[in-house]
């Protein structure tokens, strides 16, 4: 009866509702009160209606279910693109797209609609937010972009000779801030970098080995090279070594350089392109940068001046060689004058 009063209006008397209820029963010959009890408020539009499993009326269910399905499809497609793409701008745009659609799905959760969000997508958004918070501490001049170990102009133009002193000071400040973050435990190599399956397996083993030897994994600093190899440093201590777990070969590249400059104006894929660019920009010379011959390799240090390599090892052999890296880190910390045996 209370449901009928709410439906008709508060101004209708109880006697009037009894008369109306009897009238409706006579017309439809159905238990009206039972039907009203079966109807509930839609979680999306609050209309009193028969609801679906998601707690939605028929009209809202069609719209919301399509919206949820489409957001989940876009999220899953974006995850696949992030895992396979080597274009940084594509990866960044897909991360932002995932964040947008997770926000949409969370709005459904706020009204009680059950939505399952992939954990991988949540991890990507968390990692991106952490990366953005880290980058904000650099306070980079908006005219420049910091990518990996290099600084570029935001407008895409080459850095002029007059800008080089300022860019060097800016680079030094960024290096200092990165080192501070490593020492403060704000860096996590497993979350801050995109890895292939084998690379993630290797670096997960490396992190566990560091912890077992009472070394700090947050002090690991990785630098991805153009050959897909990864340089590994232990911050404020030493260069540890290099790992290349991709069997693909990388071609030779040609750097166009001005005399007296430490950085190349541009690195091109063919010598003809480099010659043309050198004449266009008035550069002085072309430097050959050999590519990777192909195959997996791992470099480790025997002492401060001697590097050794494992050529074409298996992934397990690389993992088994991690103690050589650990030993060298401890060597740099405790006995810089002796030779590792």
Image: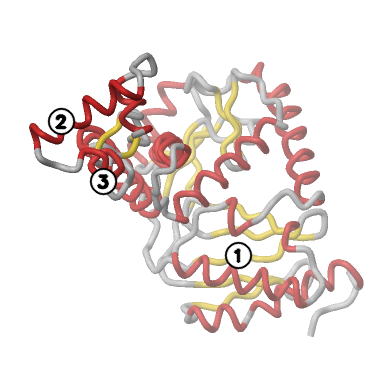
Per the image, the residue denoted by label 3 is 52
Q: Earlier in the sequence, mark 1 or mark 3?
A: 3
Per the image, the residue denoted by label 1 is 242
Q: Quadrant of residue 41?
A: top left
Disc nearest the viewer among 1 and 3: 3
Find the distance from the CA under tag 3 to the CA under tag 2.
Answer: 26 Å
> Where does residue 250 sit, x and y in percent of width and height?
40, 57
Residue 287 seen in this snapshot: yes
> Where does residue 53 sit, x and y in percent of width and height?
29, 50
Query: Is 154 on the left-hand or right-hand side of 254?
Result: right
The residue closer to the viewer here, 175 or 136, is 136
- Structure colour scheme: secondary structure
Q: Secondary structure at mark 1?
A: strand
Per the image, the residue denoted by label 2 is 24
Q: Residue at x 21, y 25 (%)?
A: 20
The residue furthest top is: 11
Q: Say if 114 sits above or below 161 in the image.
A: below
Query: Is 290 on the left-hand or right-hand side of 161?
Result: left
> Where does residue 267 sit, x and y in percent of width and height?
46, 39
> Dot 3 surroundings within 10 Å: few (below 14), some, or many (20 or more)?
few
Find the distance from the CA under tag 1 to the CA under tag 2.
Answer: 83 Å
Q: Residue at x 76, y 45 (%)?
A: 181
The residue closer to the viewer here, 261 or 50, is 50
Q: Secondary structure at mark 3?
A: loop
Q: Quadrant of residue 336?
A: bottom right
The residue closer to the viewer here, 14 or 210, is 14
């Amino acid at each position: 009866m209370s449901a009928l009063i709410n439906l008709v209006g508060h101004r209708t008397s109880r006697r009037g509702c009894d008369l109306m209820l009897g009238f409706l029963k006579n017309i439809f010959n159905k238990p009206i009160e039972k039907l009203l009890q079966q109807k509930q408020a839609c979680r999306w539009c609050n209309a009193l209606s028969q609801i679906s499993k998601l707690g939605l009326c028929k009209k809202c269910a069609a719209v919301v279910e399509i919206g949820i399905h489409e957001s989940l499809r876009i999220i899953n497609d974006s995850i696949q693109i992030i895992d396979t793409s080597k274009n940084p701008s594509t990866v960044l745009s897909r991360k932002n797209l995932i964040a947008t659609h997770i926000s949409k799905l969370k709005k459904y959760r706020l009204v009680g609609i059950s939505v399952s969000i992939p954990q991988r997508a949540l991890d990507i958004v968390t990692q991106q937010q952490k990366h953005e918070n880290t980058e904000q501490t650099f306070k980079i001049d908006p005219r420049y972009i910091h990518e990996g170990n290099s600084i570029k102009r935001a407008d895409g133009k080459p850095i002029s000779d007059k800008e080089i002193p300022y860019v060097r000071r800016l680079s030094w400040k960024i290096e200092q801030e990165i080192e501070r973050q490593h020492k403060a435990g704000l860096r996590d190599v497993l979350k801050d970098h995109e890895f292939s399956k084998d690379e993630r397996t290797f670096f997960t083993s490396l992190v566990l080995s560091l912890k077992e030897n009472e070394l700090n994994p947050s002090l690991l600093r990785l630098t991805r090279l153009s050959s897909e190899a990864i340089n590994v440093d232990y911050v404020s201590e030493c260069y540890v070594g290099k790992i290349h777990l991709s069997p693909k070969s990388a071609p030779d590249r040609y750097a166009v350089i001005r005399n007296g400059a430490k950085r190349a104006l541009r690195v091109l894929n063919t010598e003809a392109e480099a010659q043309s660019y050198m004449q266009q920009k008035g550069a002085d010379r072309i430097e050959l940068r050999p590519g990777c011959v192909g195959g997996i390799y791992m470099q480790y240090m025997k002492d401060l001046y001697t590097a050794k390599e494992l050529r074409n090892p298996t992934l397990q052999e690389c993992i088994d060689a991690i103690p050589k890296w650990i030993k060298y880190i401890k060597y740099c910390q405790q006995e810089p004058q002796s030779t590792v045996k």
